[in-house]
Image: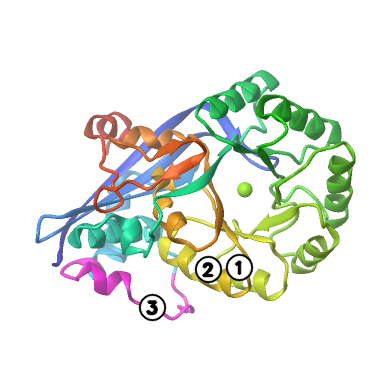
Amino acid sequence: MKLKQYELHSVHLPLPHPIGDSQVRFVDHRGTILELETDTGLRGVGLQVQQGMPTAALKELKEQFEFQTWPALLGANPFSVANRIERPRGGNVGASPFGLVVETALWDLMSKHLDLPLYRLLGGTRTRVRAYGSTLDFHLTDDEFRAKLIRFREQGFKAMKIKVGHPDVAWDLARMSIARQEMGPEPDLMIDANEAWSPKEALLRLHRYRDEGFEIYWMEDPIDRHDLDGYRMLCSEIPFTRINTGEYLGFSGKRRLLEAAAVDVLNVHTSISESRTAARLAGDYGIPVSLGNTPLETGVHAAVSFPECLYMEFSDLMWNVLAREPIRFEDGYAIAPDRTGHGLELDREALAHYSVPG
Ligand SMILES: [Mg+2]
């Protein structure tokens, strides 16, 4: 089996509501889709999303791909490319904007070649993992926020994550109160401050939320991603909730968190290969992982294969319009599809509709 040709698409997905957090606000997704085809007639698909950021026009994307990426793929066996371990230091080499789309398409191809669902190629024996509804609500009105919570509840989600980190602590408390009204007292509530605070401010806020009666399942990214001392302090000083971080760090950063005892739940996402390695290392430290958003929810395959994944995130984002059969969520679980590959075939009509010409 050899890689024979490729097709690139550039898509623009306007969002029905702005999404974001205490630091950022987005009104659309721009994405790159790669289809890789083998000489045996198999087709693998990968999607990568640039949050709100304008993407190069399709013509320039293709020029970059031809220059930087395709020469190493043309004629190669997908297994020998995907299983290659590269030296972490590359000297004066720019990062590839195609890393994720290539990797996802290769995993899709490998599992299709073996006639297996991807989660089984990854060693998964379960088909479902607990999932939470993630509201990305910082820029929504209270009514819009409430509507999202109700929608997740009606979809069967038993856990939800909301945004905090407003300069006015009363705003955070009011939003947690709305969340509890809609979720009820039992389901797990997670909060995400997206690095809004100093370590001391994080301590003060967490104690305040606790004093106001809010039980929090995990606190995500309270402080700057590189503040290992701050994270270590929070993990040891806060006995009543878990500290979830790592979303903004690559593998080396995640390793440093684990080495420094500076994380209670390691956030892994995006690259299947990297998240597997990080989950393996976290397991060695006895630390569970959670899986953040992945384009088209392809990460469900990795999540069900991890030995200890507390939850997978679901934000109900626009990218699922591109899939003929999106990943299903039922009774608070994400279900890994039993189709071969990652199981996400492109909806050609939707792809044509959202493609950016040229
Ligand atoms: Mg987050």
Numbered disc 2: secondary structure: helix
Q: Which mark is residue 85?
A: 3
What separation in Å lies between label 1 and label 2 (alpha carbons)? 7 Å
Q: Position of residue 5 (x, y in %)?
A: 16, 57
- Residue 216, by quadrant, is top right
Q: For mark 1, does the 10 Å Cα neighbourhood hold few (<14), some (14 to 19), or many (20 or more) residues?
A: many
Looking at numbered disc 3 in the image, what kind of residue is underneath it?
Ile
**Extreme residue in the top direction:** 143
Query: Is residue 29 in view from this perspective?
Result: yes
Ranked by sequence position, the earlier of labels 1 and 2 is 1
Residue at 41% of width from left, 33% of height from top? Answer: 13
Considering only vertical position in the picture, is 79 above or below 334?
Answer: below
Q: Is residue 81 located in the magenta-colored stretch of the structure?
A: yes
Helix, strand or loop for the magenta stretch, by majority: loop
Q: Inspect the image, locate mark 2, and give the three-letter code of the amino acid beneath it.
A: Ala
Q: Position of residue 140 (x, y in %)?
A: 65, 26
| 40 shown above or below 32 | below
Q: Which residue is mark 2?
A: 278
Pointer 1 residue: 254
Q: Earlier in the sequence, mark 3 or mark 1?
A: 3
Tell me which residue sits at (25%, 60%) in the image. Answer: 111
Spatial CA distance of label 2 from label 3 is 15 Å
Query: Which residue occupies the extreme left position in the image?
Result: 40
Q: Residues within 10 Å of mark 3 (few under 14, many from 20)?
A: few
Badge 1 marks a residue whose secondary structure is helix
Find the magenta span and give its range: 73-93
- Whether residue 64 is in magenta: the answer is no
Please tell me in which quadrant of the rendered image residue 349 appears. top left
Who's the residue at 78% across and 42% down the image? 215
User: How far apart in space, not on screen, are marks 3 and 1 (Cα)?
Assistant: 18 Å
Going by the image, does 346 lie left or right of 336? left
Q: Position of residue 247 (x, y in %)?
A: 59, 56
